[in-house]
Image (cartoon, grey):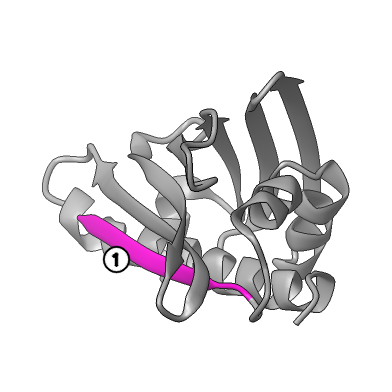
Amino acid sequence: MKISATISYPDGTTPAQVYELSTDPGFREEVCKATNALAHDVKVDAKGDTATVVVSRTMPAEVPDFIKKMVGETVDVVQTEDWGAPDGDGHRTADVVVQIKGQPATMNGTAEILTSPDGVVMQIEGDLKVAIPIFGKKVEPEIAKGIYAAIKTEERQAAQRLPG
């Protein structure tokens, strides 16, 4: 299942500010709390112009009962972002992997910090796969809802932190 979302940032925000926010452990922890994570851990490994961000969250399984029977009351989600160096315009790209621990569910994709006519945005594209015969295609939309909700929460938290 294809995932596509855009986070828009306040007017006057620069790509460098968005990258700095995206690699700020304090901000990422705020987002975890705002998504109602039951537990979370954030690690950022910055090396020069690049960084790896790993966000682990234990989330309540807010899914239909037929899925909850498979996953239990909570799910452990690990999101890894490998951010590359900026290009000449300050744009950056990250390889993004989202895994649900202990379950055959992953999303592989990219996040790009770009300027657009409307300001700075982060464009997120991914391919969500649930490798469960017969049920996988029924489960993917439920996981996608959680991914989209987390993206919207991050956008709201960023609007509170960035000038504009």
> Is 3 part of what is drawn in magenta?
yes
The amino acid marked with disc number 1 is Pro
The percent position of residue 37, horizontal first and vertical second, equals 74, 57
Picture layout, residue 25 above or below residue 145? above
Give the SS element for disc 1. Answer: helix
Residue at point 79%, 37% (across, down): 41
The foreground one among 66 and 18 is 18
Residue with the mark numbered 1: 141
> Is 28 part of what is drawn in magenta?
no
Picture layout, residue 48 above or below residue 152? above
- Picture quarter with the C terminus: bottom right
Counting the numbered discs, the total is: 1
Picture layout, residue 41 above or below residue 122? above
Residue 148 lies in what quarter of the image? bottom left
Magenta stretch: dominant SS? strand
The percent position of residue 104, horizontal first and vertical second, equals 34, 34
The percent position of residue 3, horizontal first and vertical second, equals 30, 59
The percent position of residue 137, horizontal first and vertical second, equals 17, 56
For label 1, the crowd category at 10 Å Cα-Cα, with few meaning under 14, some 14 to 19 and many 20 or more, is some
The foreground one among 65 and 104 is 104
Picture layout, residue 33 above or below residue 54? below
Residue at point 72%, 69% (across, down): 158
Residue at point 80%, 48% (across, down): 39
Looking at the image, the residue that sits furthest to the left is 134
The foreground one among 130 and 126 is 126
- Picture quarter with the N terminus: bottom left
Looking at the image, the residue that sits furthest to the right is 26
Residue at point 61%, 73% (across, down): 9
Residue 145 can be seen in this image: no
| 67 relative to 50 in the view: left or right | left
Q: Which residues are magenta?
A: 1-9
